[in-house]
Amino acid sequence: MENDEISTLIQEFNQLLKKMDSVYDKLAKSSGISDTAFWIIYTVKNEKETYKQKDLCVMWSYSKQTINSALKKLEEQNIIQLVSVPENKKDKKIILTEYGEKIAKELIEPVNEIERRSLGNIKERKAFVNLFKEYIETMEQETEKFINHKEEI
């Protein structure tokens, strides 16, 4: 009986994850930008430090090509500027342009407020985030075990 309950909860959880993705996708599309571009602008606007392409790949689980394409498009649209890092000319910091700051103010700041209100309504928000993190970390570990075991066969 416990396996049935777990299976049902997994289905519900995965559907909720897809629904959450859909909410962010709607927010991005309502502003005429791609999902990847949304997360780049979101990160650059919300984080204290500047990020490089490889940082975004790790943070948002996108391929290097996907991030690179989105960065090129955002640069063409004058939303971001890629600035060389003195210690490594290959690495470039991602900085919002003046126009990019305007876009971020119109798009990201309202999203931040939506997120604050939504998480703020959850009494056990810290526990919620910690449990979600624990679940994801366990999924990653179990996935690695599965993949490594598959390669041994």
Image (spheres, helix red, strand yellow):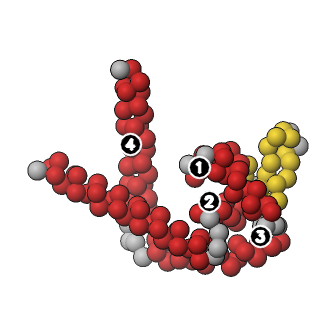
Q: Mark 3 is on which residue type?
A: Gly
The disc at residue 36 is 2
Q: Nearer the viewer, residue 86 or 145?
A: 145
Choose the circle earlier in sequence order: 4 or 3.
Answer: 3
Q: Is mark 1 on a helix, strand or loop?
A: loop
Q: Earlier in the sequence, mark 3 or mark 1?
A: 1
Residue tagged by mark 1?
A: 62
Q: Name the residue under label 3.
A: 100
Q: In which quarter of the image is residue 36?
A: bottom right
Q: Quick one: label 2, few (<14), some, or many (20+) residues within 10 Å?
A: many
- CA distance for labels 4 and 3: 37 Å
Q: Considering the numbered disc 3 on the image, is that residue within a helix, a strand or a loop?
A: helix
Measure the C-alpha gap from mark 2 to mark 4: 26 Å
User: Marks 2 and 1: CB-CB under 8 Å?
Assistant: yes
Residue at the image position 40 percent from the left and 72 percent from the top: 122
Q: Where is residue 3 in the image (x, y as percent from the top left)?
A: 17, 48
- Classify residue 71 by image quadrant: bottom right
Q: How crowded is mark 3: few (under 14 residues within 10 Å), some or many (20 or more)?
A: many
**Amino acid on which the number 2 mark rests in the picture:** Thr
Does residue 137 appear in this view? yes
Residue depicted at x 83% and y 72%: 98
- Residue hosting label 4: 138
Question: Residue 66 in the image: x percent, y percent?
Answer: 64, 51
Query: For the residue marked with disc 1, what is the amino acid?
Result: Tyr
What x and y, as percent, mark residue 77?
Answer: 79, 67
Left or right: residue 150 compared with residue 115 = left
Q: Name the side, left or right, on which 30 lies relative to 44.
A: left
Separation of marks 4 and 1 at Cα, in angstroms = 20 Å
Disc 3 to disc 1, C-alpha distance: 21 Å
